[in-house]
């Protein structure tokens, strides 16, 4: 083999190794970005639900039982509580609205 062929083979080997390393790094980066994208989509969905709950709060009126008469003045309404930004914190729609207006 001539020196030119040896040099060509060496350059090809090094370029192939570099290309494989670059492809591996790109695959890792793409995998990380895909995971981050999924997490951001889930967070976006949670934020949409919180915003919807804050802008459209629900009020539930319990049904009148046989022992309690159902009158407009004696009806007791219950506020529906929603799960806040972290699972261990419970917030009302009013509190969520105030929180969102501060952001």
Image: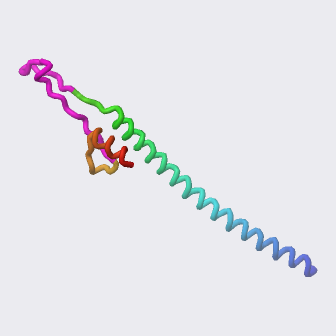
| Residue 82 included in the magenta stretch of the image | yes
To which quarter of the image does residue 15 belong? bottom right
Which residue is located at x 10 percent, y 23 percent?
A: 74
- 38 or 5: which is nearer to us? 38
Range drawn in magenta = 61-84
Q: Is residue 2 toward the left or the right of residue 50 in the image?
A: right
| Residue 64 included in the magenta stretch of the image | yes
Above or below residue 88? Residue 25 is: below
Residue 79, given in percent of the width and then of the height, sits at: 22, 34
- 69 or 72: which is nearer to us? 72
Residue 39, given in percent of the width and then of the height, sits at: 47, 51
- 87 or 84: which is nearer to us? 84
Residue farthest to the right?
2
Residue 69, given in percent of the width and then of the height, sits at: 9, 18
Q: How is the image coloured?
A: rainbow
Q: Main secondary structure of the magenta part?
A: loop
Q: Is residue 82 toward the left or the right of residue 51 in the image?
A: left
Q: Is residue 8 toward the left or the right of residue 59 in the image?
A: right
Residue 82, given in percent of the width and then of the height, sits at: 29, 40
Residue farthest to the left?
67
Which residue is located at x 31 percent, y 43 percent?
A: 98
Query: Which quarter shows the N terminus?
Result: bottom right
Which residue is located at x 20 percent, y 26 percent?
A: 61
Above or below residue 100? Residue 4 is: below
Which residue is located at x 44 percent, y 42 percent?
A: 45
């Amino acid at each position: 083999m001539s020196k030119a062929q040896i040099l060509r083979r060496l350059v090809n080997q090094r370029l192939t190794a570099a290309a494989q390393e670059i492809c591996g790094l790109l695959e890792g980066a793409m995998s990380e970005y895909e995971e981050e994208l999924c997490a951001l989509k889930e967070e976006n969905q949670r934020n949409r639900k919180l915003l919807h709950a804050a802008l459209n709060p629900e009020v539930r009126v319990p049904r009148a039982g046989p022992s309690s008469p159902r009158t407009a003045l004696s009806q007791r309404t219950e506020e529906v509580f929603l799960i806040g930004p972290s699972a261990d914190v419970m917030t009302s729609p009013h509190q969520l609205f105030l929180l969102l207006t501060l952001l």
